[in-house]
Amino acid sequence: MNPLFFLTVTARKKPPTHRGHKGRISSRATAQSQEPKVDNAVQRMLSSKNLRINELKNQLQDFRLNLDEMKEENKLLKKTQKRQEKALGKFENEESDLPQLLQRHNNEVRTLREQLKKTQDKYQRTDRYLRDAEDELDKTKNKLKKYKNLAEDKNLLERQELQKKVQQTEIDLEEKDVKVRELEKHINHF
């Protein structure tokens, strides 16, 4: 703002000059005419100084506001720094645990691979045993059929003996059939 803007300039009428003899201005008139000039100059100086004081007060207020904002920002920055230091410390602790974590992971993977291999071996053995049992069941069915055919043949004398063999074979067949079903259930659980 221009300090001259606020100055109040009042136009005063010139006081009448008291001329004495021969057109000379009296000392009394001279003193009166200089007084308004001094008052005007003093007013301008005071107004200018007041404006300067107001400007400085405004600047001081702005500086205080800036200072308060900077203090608040500084607090936030310190909080952020503490959080980051805490997170960094946590990360460094986790990083120091990394070799142990990798070792544990490798051990777990090795153990799981061993278990998988054992399970696969067990499955293969069970599968082989089941195939053998099915082959034996087929052979026993063929024998039973053969014995039934022989038992029905009227020309044979030992029919009773053959019937006993047929009965025994049927019992064996039933036992083996139960065994096969159990094995199939066992395989289905894998």
Image (tube, rainbow, N blue to C red):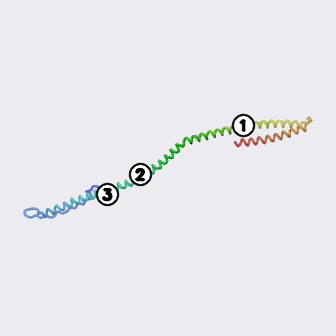
Mark pair 3, 2: CA separation: 25 Å
Look at label 3 and name its amino acid: Lys
| Residue at screen point 55% across, 40% down | 99
Q: Measure the C-alpha gap from mark 1 to mark 2.
A: 73 Å
Distance between mark 1 and mark 3 Cα atoms: 97 Å
Q: Earlier in the sequence, mark 1 or mark 2?
A: 2
| Residue 12 picture location, percent across and down | 19, 62
Residue drawn at x 56%, y 42% is 100
Mark nearer the N terminus (1 vs 3): 3
Residue 70, percent across and down?
39, 52
- Verify CB contact (< 8 Å) between mark 3 and mark 2: no
Q: Secondary structure at mark 3?
A: helix
| Quadrant (top left/top right/bottom left/bottom right) for the C terminus | top right
Residue position for label 1: 125
Residue highlighted by disc 2: 74
- Residue appearing at x 86%, y 36% in the figure: 147
